[in-house]
């Protein structure tokens, strides 16, 4: 923070882009941590330290990202005085972290620290409230999404961007089914955020993938 005047938020897990269909961990990320459920015995520690998530292909100490997970966020007082949590839109447990770090990323550079072992004493939770907050985030930042780091967008083709957006749509769709969110509501959200033509593209992509998956399973059993 002292060396980089344009430093925004520093954390331990983050994503290099914020897609229009947003989940911070989807796509290329930077992370160095182990996580698990609450517990203190020796077997627990050994088990969860095996659950080590590490993404640092360039072997960096600090890697620039867009959004940062809320397990830990450091920020300078001057930045905090300028940009605070949106407690009106994100008043619960979910998405305050992505919203805050995304807001900071509009003016500053966010970083993930990667040379330190961190234990996250939680697996996190994804429920219906989390999905509702996804929709709020999309609606709030629709004109700013997607956001890619300048040094990464030049390497990504338009086709790859659409394909990555579709993959996240499928993941959110599956989360909606698991958490009893009405599918019609999510389909409307896809049209609202991506344009109505994307509803058709999504449906074709989803069912093609599902049918191909079933065919592969049948062939493997022969």
Image (cartoon, rainbow, N blue to C red):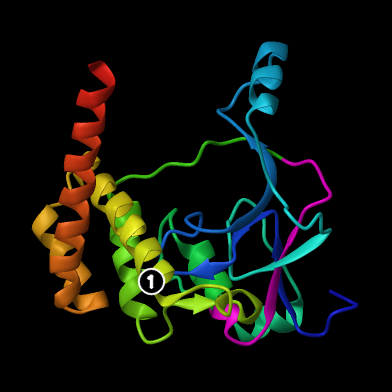
Q: Quadrant of the C terminus?
A: top left
Q: Residue at x 53, y 69 (%)?
A: 17
On the image, the x and y values in percent for residue 69 come to 58, 56
On the image, the x and y values in percent for residue 64 come to 70, 69
Which of the 4 image quadrants contains residue 199?
Answer: bottom left
Q: Residue at x 36, y 57 (%)?
A: 168
Magenta region: 103-118
Look at the picture and state if 204 lies above or below 67.
Answer: above
On the image, the x and y values in percent for residue 62 come to 79, 63
On the image, the x and y values in percent for residue 125 come to 43, 41
Q: Residue at x 35, y 79 (%)?
A: 140
Residue 115 sits inside the magenta stretch: yes
Residue nearest the observer in this picture, 119 or 58: 58
Residue nearest the observer in this picture, 22 or 206: 206
Residue 68, can we see it? yes
How packed is label 1: few (under 14 Cα within 10 Å), some, or many (20 or more)?
few
Residue 95 sits inside the magenta stretch: no
- Could you tell me how many numbered marks the image carries? 1
Q: Is residue 210 left or right of residue 103?
A: left
Q: Residue at x 43, y 56 (%)?
A: 94
- Say which element carries label 1: helix
Look at the picture and state if 213 lies above or below 183.
Answer: above
Q: Is residue 58 left or right of residue 157?
A: right
Residue farthest along the right direction in this orientation: 3
Residue 120, can we see it? no
Q: Quadrant of the N terminus?
A: bottom right
Residue ID for mark 1: 159
Which of the 4 image quadrants contains residue 11?
Answer: bottom right
Look at the picture and state if 179 lies above or below 30.
Answer: above
């Amino acid at each position: 923070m002292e060396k980089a005047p344009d430093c925004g938020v520093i954390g331990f897990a983050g994503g290099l882009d914020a897609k229009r269909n947003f989940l911070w961990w989807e796509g290329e990320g930077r992370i160095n941590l182990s996580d698990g459920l609450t517990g203190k015995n020796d077997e627990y520690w050994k088990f969860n330290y095996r659950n080590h998530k590490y993404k640092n292909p360039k072997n960096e100490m600090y890697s620039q990202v867009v959004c940062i997970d809320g397990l830990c966020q450091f920020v300078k007082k001057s930045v905090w005085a300028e940009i605070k949590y949106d407690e009106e839109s994100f008043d619960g447990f979910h998405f305050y972290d992505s919203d805050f770090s995304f807001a900071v990323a509009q003016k500053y550079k966010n970083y993930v620290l990667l040379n330190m072992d961190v234990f996250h004493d939680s697996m996190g939770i994804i429920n219906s409230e989390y999905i509702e907050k996804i929709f709020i985030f999309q609606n709030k930042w629709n004109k700013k999404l997607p956001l890619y780091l300048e040094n990464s967008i030049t390497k990504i083709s338009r086709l790859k961007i659409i394909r990555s957006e579709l993959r996240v749509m499928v993941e959110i769709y599956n989360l909606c089914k698991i958490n009893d969110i009405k599918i019609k509501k999510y389909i409307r959200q896809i049209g609202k955020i991506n344009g109505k033509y994307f509803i058709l593209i999504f449906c074709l992509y989803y069912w093609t993938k599902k049918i191909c998956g079933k065919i592969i399973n049948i062939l493997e059993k022969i």
